[in-house]
Image (cartoon, grey):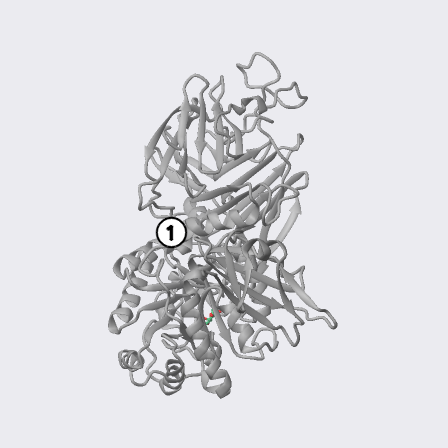
Amino acid sequence: MSICFNENEKIFTIQTKNSTYQMKVDMFDFLLHLYYGTKIENGNMDYLLPKADVGFSGTPWEAQDRTFSLDFLPQEFSSCGIGDYRINSINLIEENGCNAFEPRYVGHSIKKGVKEIKGMPYIYDENDNAETLEIYLKDNVTNLEVTLNYTVFYDMDIIARSTTFKNNSNNTVKLNKIMSATLDINHCDLQMIHFHGRHAMERNFERNNIPHGITSISSKRGTSSHHHNPSIILCENDTNENHGNCYGISLVYSGNFLIEVEREQFEQIRTNVGINPENFEYHINKGDVFETPQVLFTFSNNGFSKLSQNFHNAIRNNICRGKYKLERRPILINNWEATYFNFDDDKIIKIAKQASDLGIEMFVLDDGWFGKRDDDNSGLGDWFVNTNKIKIGLPKLVEEINKMGMKFGLWFEPEMISYDSDLYRKNPDWAVKIPNRNPNKSRNQLVLDMTREDVREYLFNRMTDILDSANIEYVKWDMNRSICDAFSALLPKDRQGEFYHRYVLGLYDLLEKLVSRYPDLLIEGCSGGGGRFDIAMMYYSPQIWCSDNTDAIERLSIQYGSSFIYPISTVGSHVSAIPNHQTGRTTSIDTRAVVAMSGSFGYEMDLNLISDEEKQKVKEQIKTYKELQPIIHNGLYYRLSQPEVDNYTAWQFVSKDKTETLLNVVVTKVCANKMYINIKLKGLDENKNYVVNDKIYAGSVLMNAGLIIKNPIGDYPSYQFHIKEYKN
Ligand code: GLA
């Protein structure tokens, strides 16, 4: 049993393999947080609860002394309007205009299985391993209720939390904020890591002390965004990759989010995670329920490597779905950077033919095959094959490519509509825009109103029509702008505040219908690269184009940041042409491949244009990737350096039985007269022997004395060591 309730002490204890989470129902039925951290087999941590008579921190009416205050007690779900002045878990307005909510414990249940969230992605369990604790809290004056859900995966060290709000009152209430989870920590000091960025430079790692006041990361772009990933890590000051306490927190949601962290007057740290309350206003009618998205928590007392491995394991096995969840994905060639919009079927066949000769397994036809689409000004929404470009028709083109022994994949950007499109001319009110205002254009396009069923039905029909017309085994699902001008022509005026969340629900609805109809279809997510790189999208697409930046050196930082939360199998990564189209940088085809192989691998260039020597290398790379893919996708991942700090970037995969490891190194700054780089490996068995370049080393030697790379020279040299156990 990973969840237990001590009736006498009214203490809930959640145990995972390496962590303990504890909370207590206090004498007034408030649910207080006691502890989350390193596993404690038997312990009651309620002595940690602060007790003090503090000025300007009031006490609930029935409290006998002034040492009890909701203003400093750690809570599982904080009240609003009744004396907790820190960031709140909820904010609502009742029919009478009041905005108080006082959550008191009224009961709980412990169930086998997971918490299913209707219409939204959630962590699932195929092996009957999970247990769920539901704690019911009620405001006794209004009868409004919240249920706090904790789904526990013991072996994976994962606790998935979410909140269910139920309106048991007689009136409609307006929800202005409802967080998926609140975590109060008062037993240690913490720093915060987050992953910020911009288009073509996503998920940059940043680590800061948490200042007094409120620090937040968020998105109000309608997507989880390039700018802030919906994940943070809280860690102690001395935590590093191998050592120390850290908490990983990642929201399973693809829309507007908020993660806010407050260091309050007594240095306690409160973290709230959930839908962004800005531009959010939900009307909940009598009897109705509102479910928040889920948030995954993991704790590691062995540093960041273990924390990342916990997330990788959970996302790969219990979030990703479909045929390709664990299978090796076909090595693909994508024509985007090879042709942009300028192609016809002859050109495509030529690129595909060369790719297939070198061993590539799937051809992906990117943007420009439909409607009137010779640049990014027109055509989105008109999902009909453009027979000026694909003169032989799509079924025939797919047949030709299949004949070469390759699968075929196709790009869509379903959520978008071009102003210059037949779809817009016919249904202008399907575009998201505010009446009497000109909408903001971004990449010259508008957004389709995904809250509408008729819009989703149109998209489903167009997409299935195309997908059924030929043997299409992969879809790249793109989304190339941020949303604004939020307004739906179908929502009543008092429901416009629901637009953004309803948009995300609409997106999930369409994706769910498609994955149910085509369980074997591989969907690669994309939003101008990694603008919607979140756990929720991974429920539908087990890989996501990680960034529009295909420069191998910049990718080191992007893939480094991504690796803290997301499994390597979810990272779409391609070898592209040089000079690189985003940075103008030139790197060798070897280095480009070493970097791109740490993901779901492919090429994005015209391979007809490279030298014979390079073609030979591509052939070898394909062979190598096929051999290495099991350890890359199933091995334990270790970061061995920091791209922005060290002169080289090194990372490693270790098979679970420790008989094999893959070490990757890219030297990003070669220095004159430097004898060697020393790299200390991780995760090996110290008592096993390993062979490196025909020499035998003990695991303890490789991990403590390290491996040396002699005299790196040239522009961005790279190294790949596939090291196996030595058996005599
Ligand atoms: C986005 C994607 C690219 C490509 C283009 C096509 O930018 O990230 O990979 O598909 O759209 O317009």
Q: What element carries label 1?
A: helix
Residue 31 pos. (x, y %):
48, 26
Which residue does the image show at 54% across and 45% down from the upper left? 259
Tell me where residue 714 appears, x and y as whole percent. 65, 77
Q: Is mark 1 within 8 Å of ligand 1?
A: no
The quadrant the C terminus occupies is: bottom left
Q: Can residue 453 be seen in this view?
A: yes
Left or right of residue 64: residue 421: left
Give the camera-side residue of 568 and 103. 568
Q: Is residue 340 visible?
A: no
Q: Which residue lies furthest to the right in this view?
A: 673
Q: In which quarter of the image is residue 541?
A: bottom left
Q: Depth check: give the residue in front, 305 or 295.
A: 305
Looking at the picture, how far across and down is residue 91, in whole percent? Answer: 50, 35
Instruction: Identify the residue under disc 1.
Output: 317
Residue 462 position (above or below residue 535): below
Q: Residue furthest front?
A: 728
* Residue type (three-letter) at the residue carrying disc 1: Asn
The answer to whether residue 435 is above or below residue 212 is below
Give the vertical position of 304 relative to 46 (above or below): below
**Quadrant of the frame with the N terminus:** top left
Looking at the image, the residue that sits furthest to the top is: 64
In this view, the residue in front, 108 or 331, is: 331
* Image spot of residue 149 (x, y percent): 40, 35
Alpha-carbon neighbours of circle 1 within 10 Å: few (<14), some, or many (≥20)? some
Q: Looking at the picture, tell me which residue is in the foreground, 714 or 251.
A: 714
Residue 623 vs 134, above or below: the answer is below
How many circles with numbers are drawn on the protein? 1
